[in-house]
Image (spheres, rainbow, N blue to C red):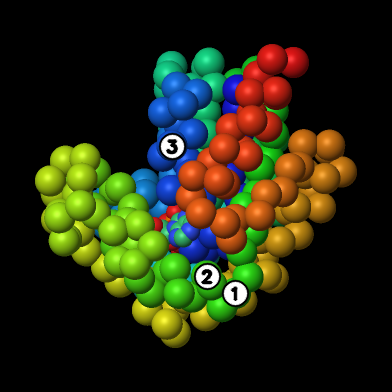
Amino acid sequence: MHIILMGPPGAGKGTQAEKLAKEFALPHISTGEMFRNAVKEGTEMGKKAKEYMDKGGLVPDEIVVGIVKERLSKPDCTGGVLLDGFPRTLEQAEALDEVFEELKMKIDAAVSVDVEAEELINRLTGRRVCRNCGATYHMKFNPSKVRNICDHCSGELYQRSDDTIDTVKERLIIYNSQTLPIIEYYKRKGLFAGFDGSRPINEVFTDISAYLQKIQEK
Ligand code: ADP
Ligand code: ADP
Ligand code: ZN
């Protein structure tokens, strides 16, 4: 199964992707996570991406499409993949279609989780991420068992530098102008499925899992 996971920043894409990847044994590919790793490693690409990320903007399409294409060409993606946070523009969606065609793969579903803006701001400003494994927590809504320590790997939790109120507001504006149009794109292809992401993490997970289960059985 090749699945795209979409939604505004803070809707729970990463949280759901972590659980879905485990449930359906799919590699979880998060472009945001790939960029944060590149920033951490101090690569040229990381330096370039950071300029855009810190302002709440999108990294240019040619950079994003390049790293996704490289990742999708790896052997672990032939059986399926869970794309989290890509595509984010119409140009990326079109480029992804070409990459899939080249690799003789097809998209099975474009799943979107949606949450209203006020709640997104609460979620993003309380988000904490593991420095070591990238697992996501929330100070109030999904706290780690031990304060500031990752449940999975005992890594240290930190607040992302782009999870400040001003950057979050900019990211929401960009989502509405640049990313929302791709929902129509996938609706036209009959691949779109929208889910209410405002409910508790496990309820959202149960809904999306049931849907993917049906897709898998087709
Ligand atoms: P969130 O989950 O909060 O939406 P991500 O971790 O997915 O954030 O992405 C963090 C940042 O990385 C984005 O704000 C953007 O600058 C950059 N980024 C991630 N994916 C893409 C993409 N597909 N296109 C352009 N920029 C991206
Ligand atoms: P995205 O990848 O879409 O930006 P995340 O998965 O990182 O979103 O979630 C954003 C924040 O909201 C995190 O702190 C996460 O723990 C929390 N969160 C995710 N899903 C829910 C939910 N259903 N209810 C409450 N908080 C949630
Ligand atoms: Zn961890």
Q: CA distance from mark 2 to mark 1?
A: 5 Å
Image point (22%, 63%), residue name: 158
Question: In terms of image quadrants, where is residue 100?
Answer: top right
Label 1 crowding class (10 Å Cα cut-off): few <14, some 14-19, many 20+? some
Separation of residues labelled 3 and 2 (CA atoms) = 20 Å
The quarter of the picture where residue 165 lies is bottom left
Looking at the image, residue 26 lies above or below residue 170 = above
| Type of amino acid at the residue the image marks with label 2 | Leu
Query: Which numbered disc covers residue 44?
Result: none
Residue 131 vs residue 98: left or right?
A: left
**x, y percentage for residue 65?**
54, 45
Q: Amino acid at mark 3?
A: Lys
**Which residue occupies 76% across, 59% down?**
181
Q: Position of residue 11 (x, y in %)?
A: 54, 59
Q: For the residue marked with disc 1, what is the amino acid?
A: Ala
Determine the secondary structure under disc 2.
Answer: helix
Give the residue number, with chain letter if any, for mark 2. Answer: 120
In front: 199, or 215?
A: 199
> Where does residue 131 sit, x and y in percent of width and height?
20, 53
Q: Is residue 128 visible?
A: yes
- The answer to whether residue 70 of the structure is visible from this angle is no
Residue 195 vertical position relative to residue 108 in the rendered view, above or below: below
Pick the residue in front: 184 or 151: 151
Secondary-structure class at tag 3? helix
Please, what secondary structure does the residue beneath circle 1 have? Answer: helix
Residue on which disc 1 sits: 117
Residue located beneath label 3 in the image: 19
For the C terminus, the quadrant is top right
- Mark 3 or 2 closer to N-term? 3
For the residues labelled 2 and 1, say whether their Cβ atoms are less than 8 Å apart.
Answer: yes
